[in-house]
Amino acid sequence: MDQRYSKGEISQKDLLKYMTDLYDLSKYEGFVEGQLKSIIETAKINYDYGYFNASLKKINEGVAIAKLEKNSMALCRLFLIYQRILIKLDQFHESQDALKKCEYYNSLVSENDERDINHIFILLGKAELLVDANGLSKDMDTVVSLKREAYSQAMLLRDNDKYKKFIVINTLESLAWSLALAEKLSEAREVVIKIDDLLMKYPNEEFITQSFVIKGAIENISKDYQQAIKYFSIVIERSAKNRNTYNFFEITPMISASYGQIGDFEEATKYSWKYAHLLDSINSANKKSNNITLIKNINLSAKDKQRVISDVNKMLLYGILVLIISIELLLFYQRIKRNSLVLPFITNKEDKFQKEEIDITIKVMRLINFAKDDINVYYVEFQKIYPYFYQNLKDRYPKLNINDLNYCSFVKMNFNNEQIAEYTQTTLKSVESRRYRILKKIEIKSTSDLYILLSKL
């Protein structure tokens, strides 16, 4: 492991073999430090390959051991990996809590060098919390600033620190990616040159592959789609060689989009179908996995005893409050029911108005069911209930396409992004990207503003 971090010559596949041996030997000999180091490295490698369930199992095991040993250093490293997995699994609030845990455990680390290294990755974690699934943010300047700070802190590490080169390249690649997405292309290219110089002396397989991803993204944004395709093709080739399916999965939408831009729709469709197939496989694997159970176990293991007792007290308090509110609502309902018996008869006009409102409510409820059961029927029925919605929206905002209008119909129905992804059988990432593009086209700041706008149409 030390050789890998100091020279960068060992691939993750080789490292995984060494870590497996280290784990077995350490467990047999009762060498807890070696066992924890193996668990941390194995969890990280599984994360890089997209094996989130396997990584969560290791983290769950590691947190239990580290808590028992009161090893704040190991807990911080484990929660850094955990936070990144939670982001990938769209567990945003849990990811925020995990990062707070990282900061807490890091404050307990006694060694300055180790604490500084953890702080660098905490800065990167804070940046990741600000971006969506595609790496975009409404505040890209802050994202870039956090990553610049992480790089500056990495450069301050001692030159004889075996982790320095690894951390410097890691922060530079993260910075270059965000600079590219922020369309600061000249700066992104300058950072890529630094990365290439470092990789000549530190030939880490994963970093080299990631550098081609970044180069492809830069050329794609620069509209040099042919060059972008060349870089993305190298990534696909290297991913196949290293059997990194997850890396291949993440690159296919980008190369598909590049082929689409040059008019090669056959290749674009081919990679689009490959992406869809991989997405189905990943979703199927996630459904069969016990990710949610593992996440609950990890969160529970991380809690201190006093905090668990406090949470129980809170639950009891909430239960009492709910009981009181329920009783008050029941009494209120009974008073309303009694009062309704002595109300005068409503007029025919009021009766007609109420009947219309009830009819609309029934139609809306049916519409919600259509969205769940048959999305195509939903689109048809929506336009029957709101016949002028699409046209009015298109007239006001000509840049919106049919997919944008469909998304807006869901927002009007007050569906959240998770529901939209489920009903349209797409990923949460693509739904969030759609929302981001619509906000830019309409030039408003938030989804709540969008809902207010759409509710008036």
Image (cartoon, rainbow, N blue to C red):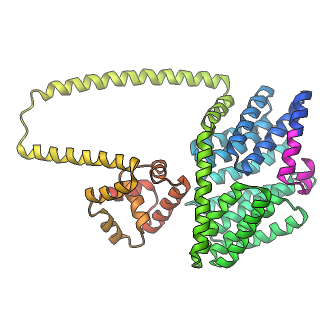
Q: Is residue 139 left or right of residue 207?
A: left
Residue 56 picture location, percent across and down? 70, 39
In the picture, measured across the screen, residue 357 lies left or right of residue 341, that is right
Query: Residue at horizontal 70%, vertical 69%?
Result: 232
Is residue 10 found inside the magenta-colored segment of the image? yes
Q: Picture quarter containing residue 233?
A: bottom right
Residue nearest the observer in this picture, 143 or 431: 431
Image quadrant where one finds the C terminus:
bottom left
The answer to whether one can see residue 172 in this image is no
Q: Which range is magenta? A: 1-20
Location of residue 278 (image quadrant) = bottom right
Tell me the residue at 79%/55% (across/down).
153
At horizontal 52% and vertical 24% (from top left) the residue drawn is 314
Q: Main secondary structure of the magenta part?
A: helix
Q: Position of residue 209 (x, y in %)?
A: 77, 63
Quarter of the image where one finds residue 247: bottom right
